[in-house]
Amino acid sequence: MKFEDFGVKMKEMGIARQQNEFFFHGIPLLDFFKINPNKFTFMVAQKINDEKFALSFDFSEKILKQIFVKMASEKKVPTKKVPFFSNRFILNQAIYINIKATMGKEERDSCGDVFIPFIIEEVL
């Protein structure tokens, strides 16, 4: 099932121009991908006001360290690499994070679909 991208929806509604920071609470993190040495990403489907959206979150190595601190405080098992996907990491158990983010730039996925990731500034 395919969901509308939340970043694109915020841009269409004009909210992206009015708001610099976005706060997301209780976002489940179960796996993430390494895009390059200092860029990681994960995606979730989240229900917002009775509508399901796709949300993409990009983050730096600094934010990854904040996530690892949260994992340690919740006594979660570290990540493991997925065979055949050297850039995908899976947590043995989901953690739920609160996020302060800004809106990124419009991008296209490998199918040509437009999305706008949120850039994580801080794990709260």
Image: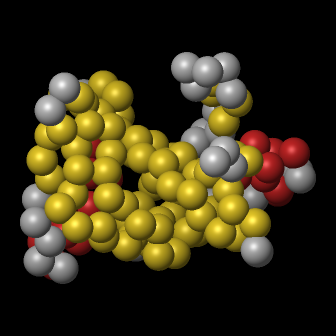
Query: Residue furthest toward the right?
Result: 13
Render colour scheme: secondary structure
In the rendered image of this protein, does residue 113 appear above or below residue 97? above
Quadrant for residue 36, please give it: top left
**Number of numbered markers:** 0
Q: Quadrant of residue 124?
A: bottom left
| Front in this rendered view, residue 90 or 105 | 90
Asked if one can make out residue 18 in the rendered structure from this viewpoint, the answer is yes
Residue 82 image offset from top left, x and y in percent: 18, 38
Decide if residue 89 is on the left or right side of residue 57: left
Against 101, is 74 above or below? below
Nearer-the-camera pick, 118 or 45:
45
Residue located 55% across and 69% down the image: 24
Residue in front for this viewpoint, 65 or 46: 46
Question: Would you place residue 87 above or below residue 62 in this image?
Answer: above
Q: Position of residue 90 (x, y in %)?
A: 23, 50
For the view shown, which residue lies furthest in the front direction?
1
Give x and y (percent) for residue 99.
47, 66
Residue pictured at 14% horizontal, 40% vertical? 81
Q: Is residue 110 left or right of residue 108?
A: left
> Is residue 102 in view from this perspective?
no
**Residue 66: x %, y % from top left:** 26, 61
Residue 103 vs residue 33: left or right? right
106 to the left or right of 102: right
Relative height, residue 101 to residue 113 (above, below): below
Specify the farthest residue to the bottom: 74
Q: Residue at x 10, y 66 (%)?
A: 77
Closer to the camera in the image, 117 or 79: 79
